[in-house]
Structures are given as C-alpha cells and as structure tokens.
Amino acid sequence: MLTDLSANTRIRLAESLPILDRHKEEIVTRLAAQVSRDSEGRQENADLVSQLVECLVDEARAVVDTGRFARAEVARQVSEQLDVGPTLSHLGDALVPIIKDIVGPSSARQTAAAWSDTFWAVFSSHERRSTAIAA
C-alpha cells in the first residue's frame, strides 16, 4: 500500500528510527502502563501494545526504505484486537509524549509529529472500518 506521508515525515522517521528501534521495549512498557490505568487485563494489553509498537516500527522502516507500507494485514489484525481493549485513540495520544522523551528536546516536536502521522496512517483506516462495521 502506498503512503501519503510527506517527504519531511519520511526524513524524520529515517533520522529517528534507530533511536526508537533501540527503545521499543521502553515504548511498550510506557504505553502498556498508560492503558492499564484505564482497563483490566494488563498482560493482554501489554501483548497487544507490543504487537502495535512492533508493527508501527516495521511500517516506519518500510516507508523509509520503499515509500510503501508493508504489513497492512498485521496492522488490520492489531487494530481489530485493540478495538476490543484499549482504543487506538488513547494509544495514539499517549505515544507522542513518550517519543518526545526518548528523542530529546532538539527535534522532539517534529519527530513526535512524524511518528504520530505514521501511527494514524497505519492504524486509523482500520479503526474507521471497524467502527463502521460495528455501527
């Protein structure tokens, strides 16, 4: 699937991908802790959050390397599972401050925005589709 992410977003992803890839475990831990405050089933949430972060990083890598998303089916499966547990909106909102903390103050706002744009490009079409089906 082709991406409509801007060239600037792709540059920010390329610059920050090694840092975020090294800190995936921290991102998962912090996101899982955030959503656990609002829901039951902490281990299940941690597993889903781990899948989401892994998928997001893989998709960012694919966008940087090829300009295309690579794992649309995986993103759809993760989105469907998360629709039953913590919402994608909650996770998307929680992701931004975590990324800002990890990349540091020099480019935090632009880098966090690039990852947020990527998150929504990867997962929001599946959330809208699931919401429409449920309605």
Image (cartoon, helix red, strand yellow):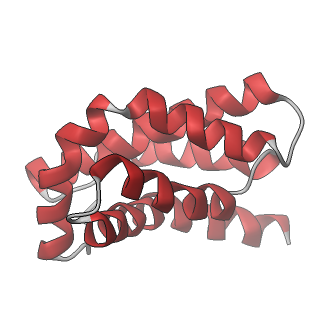
Q: Residue at coordinates 83% horizontally, 64% vertically from top-left? A: 134
Give the position of the N terminus as an image quadrant: bottom left
Identity of the residue drawn at 79% across and 28% down: 42
Q: Is residue 113 above or below residue 51?
A: below
Residue 109 quadrant = bottom left
Position in image of residue 11 (x %, y %): 11, 64
Residue at 63% across, 34% down: 48
User: Could you tell me which residue is drawn at 28 percent across and 34 percent down?
Assistant: 21
Q: Position of residue 25 (x, y in %)?
A: 45, 27
User: Residue 46 appears in which quarter of the rendering?
Assistant: top right
In the displayed orientation, state which residue is furthest to the front: 105
Which residue occupies the foreground of this view, 120 or 19? 19
Left/right placement of residue 97 relative to residue 118 reads right
Out of 131 and 45, give the one closest to the viewer.
45
Seen as rendered, the residue at the extreme right is: 40
Q: Position of residue 86 (x, y in %)?
A: 75, 49
Side of 11 relative to 19 (left or right): left
From the viewer's perspective, is 69 left or right of 78?
Answer: left
